[in-house]
Amino acid sequence: HAEQPVFGMMPRWANGWGVQTQYELEDTADERSQLLHIEGVYTWARWIRVTYKIPFIVHGRRTGATEAERGLGTPVLALPLKKYFNHDGLSGSWSLTPHVFLPLEMTDLGHSDEFAGLSASYAHETYRDAVDVGSAVHAVEGGDLEGHLTASYGRKVYFGETFGIGRVR
């Protein structure tokens, strides 16, 4: 939750846009589900953009349920605000991202009890390393607040001068 709601890498140019999909398999003691997330971004200027994430439950079943569920999950709209920096051998960004969860879900499995949130994050890359740190606070049903923290480190692996596999997480 604490990461950017969508698109780890975003267009940094005016009028840039992108769409991607992500497949997720969730297998817990309470449920087993397959989700397909459709994610998109539009960039007005390098520092301001709008993003969306629409989850579709392809197949899902709660433990003990007799029938599987399919349908729309809870979509998320976000407005990531970025401050980029470039130093000798180091580039990155600071981000502040307000986001809202739209109550349009068509299935209990895709239901989110979150209404809105605010994320703050820091990311940087060097020739060899990538670091992401973030936190978020969400307002949930009943008026409670919920917090999340995340951190990741990636080591880039290069094979010769021109071929590499990028981030390893």
Image: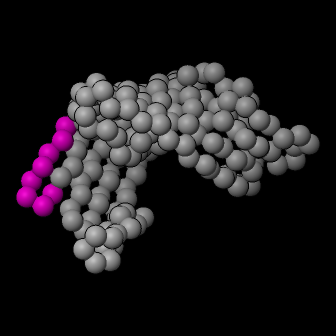
User: In the image, is 126 to the left or to the right of 21?
Assistant: left
Q: Is residue 45 magenta?
A: no
Residue 73 locus on image (x, y percent): 65, 32
**Is residue 88 inside the magenta stretch?**
yes
- Among all residues in the image, which is located at the extreme front? 162
Q: Residue furthest left?
A: 88
Q: Examine the rendered structure and indicate whether residue 163 appears above or below residue 69.
A: below
Q: Position of residue 96 (x, y in %)?
A: 29, 34
Residue 146 in sight in this render:
no
Horizontal side of 125 relative to 88 (left or right) equals right
Q: Nearer the viewer, residue 115 or 11?
A: 11
Horizontal and vertical percent position of residue 62: 80, 45
Coloration mode: one colour
Q: Image point 15% across, 57% down: which residue?
A: 90
Q: Main secondary structure of the magenta part?
A: strand
**Residue nearest the viewer, comparing 142 with 47:** 47
Instruction: Indicate the quadrant where residue 126 lies.
Output: bottom left
Q: Position of residue 75 (x, y in %)?
A: 56, 28
Looking at the picture, tell me which residue is in the foreground, 163 or 23. 163
Residue at the bottom extreme? 160
Q: Residue at x 75, y 50 (%)?
A: 32
Q: What residue is drawn where x is 18% and y is 52%? A: 91
Quarter holding the C terminus is bottom left
Q: How many marks?
A: 0
Q: Name which residue lies at 57% across and 32% down.
A: 54
Magenta span covers which residues? 83-90
Query: Is residue 46 at all visible to an observer of this figure?
Result: yes
